[in-house]
Image (cartoon, helix red, strand yellow):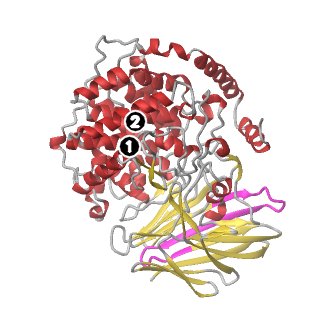
Amino acid sequence: MFSVTRLKWLMNRLRSMEHKEVASRLFDIGRHGVVYATRWRLPRRARRRASAHGQPIAMPHADWHAWHICPEVQLDYMAQADRWLQQRIQVFGLKDIPFGQAIDWHRDYSSGIRGPQKYSSMIDHRDAAVVGDIKYIWELNRLHHLVSLALAYVWTDKAAYWDTIEQHCRSWIAQNPFMVGLNWKSPLEAGIRLISWALVAWLTADDAKSQDFFRQDMRETLYAHQYFIRTFYAKHSSANNHLIGEMAGLYIGAVCWPWFRESAAWQVFAREQLIRAIAEQVGEDGVGKELATEYQLFILEFFLLSGALGHAIGDSFPASYWQRMQKMATFLEAVSDREGNLPLFGDGDSGQVISEYVPVQQRTRSLLAILHPTAAHAPHAEHRGVQGLADLRTRLLLWGKMPQAFPIQPLPQPLPWAYPQGGYYVLSTNRGREHEMVVVVDAGEFGLPPLYAHGHADALSFWLSYRGRAFLVDSGTFSYYADEAWRSYFRSTAAHNTVRVDGEDQSVAGGRFLWREVAHCQAQYHESQATYREVEGRHAGYRRLADPVVHRRTVRMNQRTSQVDIMDRLECCDTHEIELFFHFHDQCEVRQIDATHFEARRGEACIAIHLASSLTCQLYRGSEAPIAGWMSDRFGVKTPAFTLRAHSPIAGTTELTTTIVAL
C-alpha cells in the first residue's frame, strides 16, 4: 500500500516526466521482471568468455617501488585496513562499529535495521522503517575498504589482508544473489563496486592468488554487475551523476575483465556515454550542471579514472574530454581559498570513487595536482599539499602513471572570477596571501532540470573565507533518507546565507530529490575594476505569493580594504516578514556587540558584521525547536554552529545593507 506521502511524491515525479520517459520506464519495469524471472541463466551467460584462459587485458603496471608515498598517507591507509581486520566498520559518522564474525551486507549499522532479502524491485529503499537509512547500506556495499586492504597487502605481503578481501567478497556474493535485496536497486552502486574490484585486481595483478580468485570466484558477479548496468542504466530525467558513475564502472569493468562476448561492446558503449555526458552535464565554464560542489568532485573523479585508463591502454578519449575536465578543475581552484576550503553548495553525500572517506580539501588537492598544473606554482601551493607526486590518491586516479603521461595542458593565469553558465562569481583580494578574503556568490540557476534533484533553495546566497578560514558557510546536507525534517532543513532557504520571505522557501519541494517549483535566479551584471568587484543577481521565487516579491542582491568587495557590502532589495507592494540568515563555521566564536553589530573570530582571524538598524537579531546554536544553528561538512554528521537570524516586517519595496569588514 502507498502512503499519502508516497502518492504525492509519485504524482510530482510523473509531472516531471515527458511521455517518452513514462513509456521507457514502463518498458524497464517489464524488462526488470523478465530479468529477475530468468536470473538462473546468469551463470551460463557468464561463461561466454572470449578467451579460454580469461586473462585480463594489459592494464597499466603498478610499479610500487617507483612510487614516493607520504609516510603519513601510508600509515592512514594501513590504519583503515587494520580496522577491517579487527572486524570494525567505519561509515560516515559511525566509527569502529564491531560487526562480529561476518558483515551483514543488508544492515544499516546506524539504526540496526536490516533490509529485506527479496526481489529488489519490491523493496522501497526510501522507507526508513523497513530498510533503515539506505545510504549507510549502500556506502558499505561500495566496498571501498577493499582498496585499503589491497594496499596494505602489497605493502606488507601479509596474507591476512588478502584473506580478508576474499572473505568479504565471498560473503557479499553469498548474501546478494542477482536481483535480490537492496544492493541490486541501483546501477550506480554496481558501478562503484566494479571500480573497487578493478582497483584491487590492478593493485594485486602480480599475485597469483588474486588472478585465480577473480577468474574463478568472481567471474559470475563481475558479469552480473556489467550486465545489470548496461540493461538498467540511468536515462532521461535520472541521467545525472548516476549515469556518469554507471558508465565509469562499466567501462573500467569491460577493460579490466574482457572475458565476455559483450565486453568489447560494453567498453565502446560506456566510452561514448562518458564523452556525451561530460559535454551535456558540464558547462563550457567548467561548472557541473547539477550545481552541487561535492558532486562536481564526484563526477570529475569518475571522468578522470575512466579517461586515464583509456589513455593508458591506447583507447584515448578525445581532447575535448580532457579540456572539459581541466575547466572543471579550474572552477574548483577559483572557488577555493588558500587552504583548500571551498563552498559546499547544493547536496553533498561524501560520495567517494576510489577509497574510504577523504576530506573534500584533500580530494580537491589531488584533482588540482593532476588537472591544473599551474596550481603547483600558485603562491599558496605549499598549503595545498601539491608536493610533486607524493599523493597516493593522485596515483590511484591515474592508475599509477604520472600526470605528464596524459594530454593535460598548462592553464593560463589569472583564474577566471566569473562563471556565468554556472552562476558563480568569485570576489577576492590578497589572493594566496596572509590576509586573503574570498567571497563566492551563488547567482545561478537551480540545478539540472527537470528534477533539480541535488539543488538547494539557496538563490543569492554566498560563502566567505578570510585568512584561509571559512567563516560564512553553506550549512551542508547531513541526511537524505533517515529524517525528513533534517533533510528539509538543510536544503531550505533558512539554512543558507540569503533572504527568506514570509517564512517560505524560495523554491517548493516535491520530494527528497525533486523540486516542484524553482526560483529561477540569474546575474543581472558583474563588473571588475581595479578597486572593486561587484555582482548583482535577482530571483523571482516569491512571485507565487499573493503579493509577489522579487529579491535583488548586489555584492561588492573593495579590493583595497576587503570590505564587503551586501545590498538587498525586496520589491513588493504589500507587507511581508523578511529574514536574513548568516551561517558561521562551527569553529567560529560569535558575539553580539550591539543590536545589529556582531563579531566572529576563528583563531587569529576576525570579521565584523554590521546589519541595518531596522532589523531585530537573534543568535542560534544547536537549536532543535526551531531547527537552527547547525553545520554538516560530512554526510551523516552535524555539529552545532552559530547562525545569525535578522528579521523585520517590511511594507512595500525595501532596501537593506549589510557590511562585512576584516578586523
Find out whether the residues at labels 2 and 1 contact each other: C-beta distance under 8 Å.
yes
**Mark 2–mark 1 distance (CA, rounded to whole Å):** 10 Å
Mark 2 secondary-structure assignment: helix
Magenta span has 259? no
Q: What residue type is labelled 1?
A: His
Q: Look at mark 1 in the image and give the residue it sits on.
A: 145
In-front residue for pair 475/521: 475
Characterize the local packing of mark 1: few (<14), some (14-19) or many (20 or more) Cα atoms within 10 angstroms: many
**Res. 283 in view:** no
Q: Where is residue 195 in the image (x, y as percent from the top left)?
A: 39, 34
Residue sitting nearer the eye, 254 or 484: 484
Residue 168, which numbered label? 2
Please state, as top left, top right, bottom left or bottom right, where the C terminus lies in the image.
Answer: bottom left
Query: Quick one: which residue is furthest to the bottom in this view?
Result: 594
Instruction: Give the mark toward the camera: 2 or 1.
Output: 2
Above or below: residue 422 compared with residue 190: below
Magenta span of residues: 538-565
How many numbered markers are drawn? 2
Q: In this view, does 320 lie to the left or right of 279?
A: left
Using residue 336 as the reference point, say whether residue 25 is left or right of it: right
Measuring 59% from the left and 68% from the top, which residue is drawn there? 554
The quadrant holding residue 266 is top left
- For residue 568, which numbered disc appears in the image? none
- Mark 2 is surrounded, within 10 Å at the Cα level, by few (under 14), some (14 to 19) or many (20 or more) other residues, namely some
Q: Say above or below: 334 vs 168.
A: below
